[in-house]
C-alpha cells in the first residue's frame, strides 16, 4: 500500500535554524536502533525527542511504525495523524503516503484521525515550535541588552558568542537575536495570514498571538493542506 519506505523517505529539513550535534546524535541513534530491530526504543526517540523539534522525518517514522505495528500496537488511525503532521511542509513523498493511508480509512476512522491530528498539531506543528523559539529569542535578547545581566551600556560589554566561541559585543548578539526573532515572527504572521508585527512590539501581544495560533490549528482544512492532491 505504501509508495515509500523508511529507508527511502527523505529527511525534511528543519525550518528553525541549524541542527545541533545532540539532535544529530539522536537522529543517528534512532535510525541505528530501527535498523537493528529495536523498534520500541527507536519509536520513543522518534516520537518523544525528534518529533517535538519539528523533525518531519521523525514524525513520518512515528506514523510508519504505528502503521506496521513496530514497537507499538498497530494503529492505522494514529499512523494517519502522524503522517498528516509529517506532510505539513507538503514534501511530495510525505504527502503521497499520507494520502494513501487516509484513503484506506473508513468514515469513522477519518473523524478519529481529524481529532488526533488536531491534538498533534498543538504539540508538533511548525507554528507551535516557531512560537516557542520566538519566545526564547525574546528572552535571550533581553539578557543580551544588559550584557548578560550586567548593568551599563550593552555596547561596551563583551560576551562570548555561543556560535563561534569568540568574544563579541552584547549589542551585536542582541541585534542578531532580534533579526532571527523577526524572521520567526514573519513566518508566524504569514502562516496565520494576519498583518505583520514588528519584533519590538510583539512582547505585549504574545498571549493574543498564541490564541490565534491555537485557533488556527484547531481547524482542519483538507483542501488547504493538499489532502488527496498527490497522484
Image: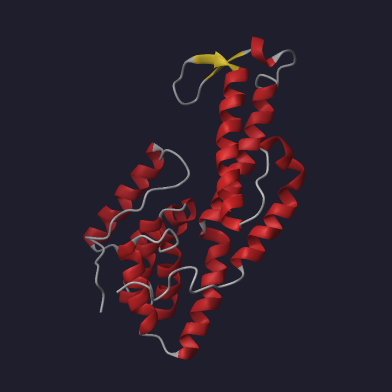
Q: Can residue 65 be seen?
A: no
Which residue occupies the foreground of this view, 135 or 38?
135
Residue at (44, 57) in percent of width and height: 51
Residue 106 quadrant: bottom left
- Rendered view: 93 above or below 81: above
In the rendered image, which quarter is residue 31 located in? bottom left
Occupied quadrant, residue 40: bottom left
* Residue pictured at 65% horizontal, 22% vertical: 148
In the image, taking residue 124 as reference, residue 59 lies left or right, namely left
User: Which residue is outermost to the right?
Assistant: 204
Please name whichever residue, 16 or 123, is drawn nearer the observer in this view of the structure: 16
Q: Residue furthest bottom?
A: 107
Residue 18, percent across and down? Answer: 42, 38
Asked whether residue 41 appears in the rendered view, the answer is yes
Viewer-proximal residue among 194 and 215: 194
Q: Is residue 217 above or below residue 171?
A: below
Quadrant of the drawing holding the N terminus: bottom left
* Residue 119 position in % (x across, y down): 56, 69
Q: x and y percent of residue 41 in the render?
A: 36, 60
- Marks counted in the figure total 0
Picture quarter with the C terminus? bottom left
For this orientation, the residue located farthest to the top is 156
Relative placement, left or right, of 120 versus 66 is: right
Q: Left of 119 or right of it: where is 155?
A: right
**How was this image coloured?**
secondary structure
The residue sitting at 37% across, 63% down in the picture is 60
In the rendered image, residue 7, in percent from the top left (x then y), is placed at 22, 60
Amino acid at each position: 500500500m505504501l509508495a515509500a519506505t523508511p529507508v527511502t523517505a527523505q529527511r525534511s529539513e528543519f525550518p528553525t535554524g541549524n541542527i545541533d550535534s545532540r539532535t544529530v546524535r539522536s537522529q543517528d541513534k534512532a535510525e541505528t536502533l530501527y535498523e537493528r530491530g529495536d523498534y520500541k526504543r527507536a519509536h520513543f526517540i522518534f516520537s518523544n525527542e525528534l518529533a517535538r523539534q519539528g523533525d518531519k522525518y521523525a514524525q513520518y517514522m512515528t506514523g510508519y511504525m504505528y502503521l506496521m505495528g513496530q514497537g507499538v500496537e498497530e494503529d492505522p488511525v494514529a499512523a494517519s495523524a502522524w503522517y498528516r503532521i509529517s506532510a505539513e511542509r507538503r514534501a511530495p513523498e510525505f504527502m503521497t503516503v499520507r494520502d494513501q493511508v487516509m484513503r484506506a480509512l473508513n468514515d469513522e476512522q477519518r473523524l478519529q484521525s481529524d481529532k488526533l491530528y488536531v491534538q498533534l498539531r498543538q504539540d508538533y506543528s511548525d507554528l507551535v515550535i516557531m512560537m516557542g523559539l520566538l519566545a526564547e529569542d525574546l528572552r535571550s535578547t533581553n539578557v543580551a541588552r544588559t550584557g548578560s545581566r550586567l548593568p551599563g551600556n550593552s555596547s561596551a560589554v563583551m560576551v562570548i558568542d555561543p556560535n563561534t566561541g569568540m568574544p563579541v559585543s552584547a549589542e551585536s548578539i542582541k541585534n542578531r537575536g532580534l533579526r532571527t526573532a523577526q524572521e520567526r515572527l514573519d513566518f508566524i504572521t504569514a502562516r496565520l495570514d494576519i498583518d505583520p508585527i514588528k519584533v519590538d512590539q510583539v512582547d505585549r501581544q504574545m498571549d493574543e498571538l498564541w490564541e490565534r495560533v491555537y485557533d488556527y490549528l484547531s481547524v482542519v482544512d483538507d483542501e488547504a493542506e493538499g489532502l488527496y492532491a498527490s497522484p
